[in-house]
Amino acid sequence: MDLKDLLWEAAKATTQEDFKKHMDQLKKLNLEAYGYLMGKEFRLWTRHAFRPFPKWDMLLNNLCECFNSAIMEARSKPIVTMLEMIKLYIMDRIVKKRQRLEDYGGPICPKIQAKIENARRGASYCIPH
């Protein structure tokens, strides 16, 4: 295995044992690279150290698919035109989202308000001990 492959194996390791095994192999191959990587926070670059709970209430894949379908026409354009079209799409989306939130007028955003209401309804069936 070369250095790049070992780096990717360490980054993709899902357990601490696998991570250590790949890092030991990398250390034998290139001590300088090993020292550099060990100096970085593991939670930022290796899967075994990621927190297990979701960071967002939306699936990333769904977000990517929606974005890709929105920029379908732009993808066939020259790079500068494509980037300009994407920039305009994003700006328009931000303005629309901001306007919807301003029109809402509630104390917190609508999605979080809905989650709180669902939790409140569910809590009516709970019995404190």
Image (cartoon, grey):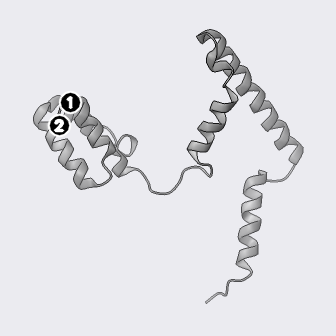
Q: Check the image and report above or below for 72 versus 12.
A: above
Q: Quadrant of the N terminus?
A: top left
Quarter of the figure with residue 111: bottom right
Q: Check the image and report above or below for 70 versus 25.
A: above
Residue at 12%, 32% in the rendered image:
29
Q: In the image, 48: left or right of 114?
A: left
What is the secondary structure assignment of the residue under circle 1? helix
Would you call the spot at circle 2 few (<14 residues within 10 Å), some (14-19), or many (20 or more)? many
Q: In the image, 22: left or right of 102?
A: left
Q: Check the image and report above or below for 87 versus 66.
A: above
Quarter of the figure with residue 89: top right
Q: Nearer the viewer, residue 66 or 119?
A: 66
Of mark 2 and mark 1, the one earlier in the sequence is 1
Q: Check the image and report above or below for 81 versus 40.
A: above
Q: Are marks 2 and 1 in contact (CB under 8 Å)?
A: yes
- List the residue tagged with mark 1: 3
- List the residue tagged with mark 2: 26
Q: Residue 43: percent from the left, percent from the top?
A: 38, 46
Q: Residue 13: percent from the left, percent from the top?
A: 30, 48
Residue at 27%, 41% in the rendered image:
9
- CA distance for labels 2 and 1: 7 Å
Would you call the spot at circle 1 few (<14 residues within 10 Å), some (14-19), or many (20 or more)? some
Q: Residue 4: percent from the left, percent from the top?
A: 25, 30
What is the secondary structure assignment of the residue under circle 2? helix
